[in-house]
Image: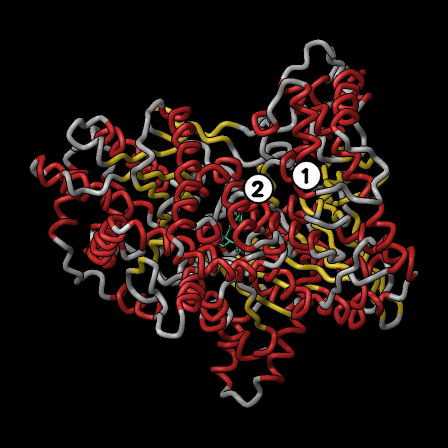
Amino acid sequence: RKRAETSKKPTDPETVHSDVLAKVEFNSGGNRGQVTALLAYQGLAWNLREHLMERMIATQNLWREKDPKFVYYLSAEFLMGRSLLNTIQNLELYEPYAQALKMLGYNLETLAEKERDASLGNGGLGRLAACFLDAMATMNLPGWGYGIRYKYGMFKQIIKDGEQMEVPDVWLTDGNPWEVRRPDVVFPVSFGGKLKKTVTGSHELVEWIPDEQVIAMAYDVPIPGFNTQNTGNLRLWESLPVNEFDLDAFNKGDILSAYNEKGRAEAITSVLYPNDSTPEGKALRLKQQYFFVSASLQDVLARFKKVHGNQFDLLPEKACFQLNDTHPTIGIAEMVHLLVDKEGLDWEAAWGITTKVFAFTNHTIMPEALEKWPVKVMREFLPRHMEIIETIDTQWQAFLEEKLSEMPKAEKQAAIDRMAIVHPNQWNKEEMLVNMAHLAVVGSHTVNGVAQIHSDIIKSTIFKDFHGVFPLKFQNKTNGVTPRRWLVFSNTDLATLITEALGTQEWMTNCKLLEGLKPFAEDAEFRKKWSAVKRKNKERLGAKIRELTGDDVDTSSMFDIQIKRIHEYKRQFLNVLSVIRRYNTIKAMTPEERKSVVPRVCVIAGKAASSYERAKDIIRLVGAVGDTINTDPEVRDLLRLYFLPDYNVSLAEVIIPAADLSQHISTAGTEASGTSNMKFQMNGSLILGTMDGANIEIAEEIAAIQGPDAKVGDGLFIFGVDAKDVPKLRKERKEFKTDPRWDEIMDMIKKGTFGNDKFEALVDSVNDMTVGNDWFLLANDFATYLDVQDEVDAMWKNQDEWVRRSILYTASSGKFSSDRTISQYAEEIWDVQPLAVA
Ligand code: 26Q
């Protein structure tokens, strides 16, 4: 691989070596004679940053010159992980940089671990945004990400006495070489105050007189594309006070209030809300959302005006905004505010432009995760926006009156009430709420779900009425993940093997070419190489497990993995129940019988929202069951269970390549898509799952590669009830007769077999049928889950077949590249075209 022709910076190892040393000295004040690992990492990063800047500027210059249509991906979360290896590999500088480091006495991979993850996201939605940026840059699409530069990202999870503790994520203390502070890019953002109205003839002018203002300052994070000069940008906003310091108060001796304004302003971008699908209506979160969206829209409009003046009717030809869930949806009201109040457009023109530039992605149907803001709160912080939303709602309801005029009156009114943007709280009719998803649907030209089943479900559930009104507004965009980070860079040995087999590395940007691996599944020599790579990856995870738990594991055991946020609907509890069942079975065996048991190392990892008690109970249970099993001399050679702390992007990069089996076992109809399932498939981990989210499409692809006779589900371990049966089963769950093995396990947990008696609430949540519990149907799926686990064991004993399937998984994973997802967004929603730096 050679470096890009247009780069001015030399990249031979000698120059890199001396350049890094210069950075150590001049940037970090380090001693050339004593380059610690941290200093070497920083020197390297500061050197690479110059390559990135050079390319980003070239890209921006071209884009400015050609003025193509841009997409702006608005997201409260970007879960980027580490940047060092991603940058080096995307720039195709691995060899010279690895050599330069060797001269410094370091190994690149070890140094890379010095970098702290950028954990500016909770889970799937945030990581999806990061994969999308990678795909956009790689495919040369004009587009930027816009988000928040949280001072503290996702909390660090510490397990103390079996319980999750949350520690602030202090990720910026060593500085962040991957961002460029832009004191020249600042916008004011206002809150609160009141409205002043002046009527001239038929025209009403509204002036918002806020009582609080902060400054949004930009930080640019260059996003290198793979195998291209193009480098995108993630622009993150930091909130700063207008006045750094109240000198007056200070002089009067009021030292603490001198810092008041600073504290209040900085609080806005201080911490990521650590909630996955269990939101809390905190006013500060609304301020965060408005803060970053307002700054982003002001920024885009300022650039637009430089080129097109006030020809705002051209805006839809030049810009579109993708709303990553409802979190940035206040942008719809902000666009109207900017166009009407600041630019003087009339309402109809402003609304017409607004609905042409926004598109909305929904990521969940969990009722508790659908954002609804009390009108009271919205009016207090954003009085003008509240009024705009009320006007939008009034016009929307008037439109519906027309549109549904054929309906009987009562029925029509009920439909309008169901689709209202502002409506009463169903639990407290006194309180009015702004339904952000309804605002997003009304204000966007397109609404999409994130996997086929999910896109179908939203049309028949939460957006059913809207779908009746605008059938063409609804689309599906099945998620994808970047094969660069999740296969090429995190599983380099497998990538090398694939490239050898296919005779080209083109598959890295054209993942459908992975299908070329199909014949190799029948090649015993190739299968041997394939397993050898897996085994090496398992050694690496084994070392990690030792580092985190102190235990050695046998890497010839099956590695059985479930990693994702801890949530009842994801059913980690069900996983633990089957591990307990396995434990009981082994205990009851004779030594002779035990010889036929397939040894397994079960790993569970993930964070629980800090206020989510049931999720925290699950973490405690995993730990407690693990302690019992892992120390039982009769069982520990055949079964282990570990909860690995502080699951994040970097840990995922070690775990996923090492998985033999991965579990995706949500109650059918609850997991919108899932994205780790795709990463596991790419890395040749067999999948045990339910027919939910993207599992269904993964199963379709795996069936397709096996030929016309294969049925969907062949080659995977599928179990559980069907999504369409869930509502009925939920109604009947009081009468459900549980399996005796289930009852036995529940008794064990209750009577304290796992050295802990605080599991009552957890057990009740799935067991107390009389009070209508077990919403996620663990009991219904328990028996078939155990059956399919037996199938897994049987298959493992036939390693030829197991490895054959593993190869076919990778071979059929091409659809789940985020390149595919992003080209569909680009063509079917955004209408943006690639524009590459020559
Ligand atoms: C909302 C309001 C207040 C506080 C927090 C939140 C909040 C924050 C994050 C609500 C939801 C989230 C994250 C949701 C999420 O990650 N959803 C996942 O999105 C993935 C990408 O589409 C899907 O693959 C997963 O199925 C879905 O669960």
> What number is the disc on residue 281?
none
Number of residue marks: 2
From this viewpoint, which residue is outermost toward the left?
A: 590
Instruction: Residue 351: name its quadrant.
Output: bottom right
Assess disc 2: are there few (<14), some (14-19) or many (≥20) residues with their C-alpha within 10 Å of its C-alpha. some
Query: Which quadrant of the figure contains the C terminus?
Result: bottom right
Q: Residue at x 72, y 37 (%)?
A: 238
Q: Residue at x 50, y 30 (%)?
A: 156
Instruction: Residue 470: name its quadrant.
Output: bottom right
Give the residue pinned by disc 2.
489
Give the residue pinned by disc 1.
87
Q: Position of residue 131 (x, y in %)?
A: 60, 50
Q: Is residue 67 visible?
A: yes
Q: Element under label 1?
A: helix
Q: Is residue 657 left or right of residue 316?
A: left
Q: Nearer the viewer, residue 426 or 430?
A: 426
Q: Position of residue 626 (x, y in %)?
A: 27, 32
| Residue 256 vertical placement versus 645 (above, below) | above
Instruction: Residue 600: name its quadrant.
Output: top left
Q: Nearer the viewer, residue 227 or 123?
A: 227
Query: Which quadrant of the figure contains the N terminus?
Result: top right
Q: Position of residue 587 (x, y in %)?
A: 12, 36
Q: Nearer the viewer, residue 157 or 802?
A: 802
Q: Position of residue 106 (x, y in %)?
A: 62, 21
Q: Residue at x 82, y 53 (%)?
A: 837
Q: Earlier in the sequence, mark 2 or mark 1?
A: 1
| Residue 70 vertical placement versus 179 (above, below) | below
- Callout 2, which amino acid? Phe
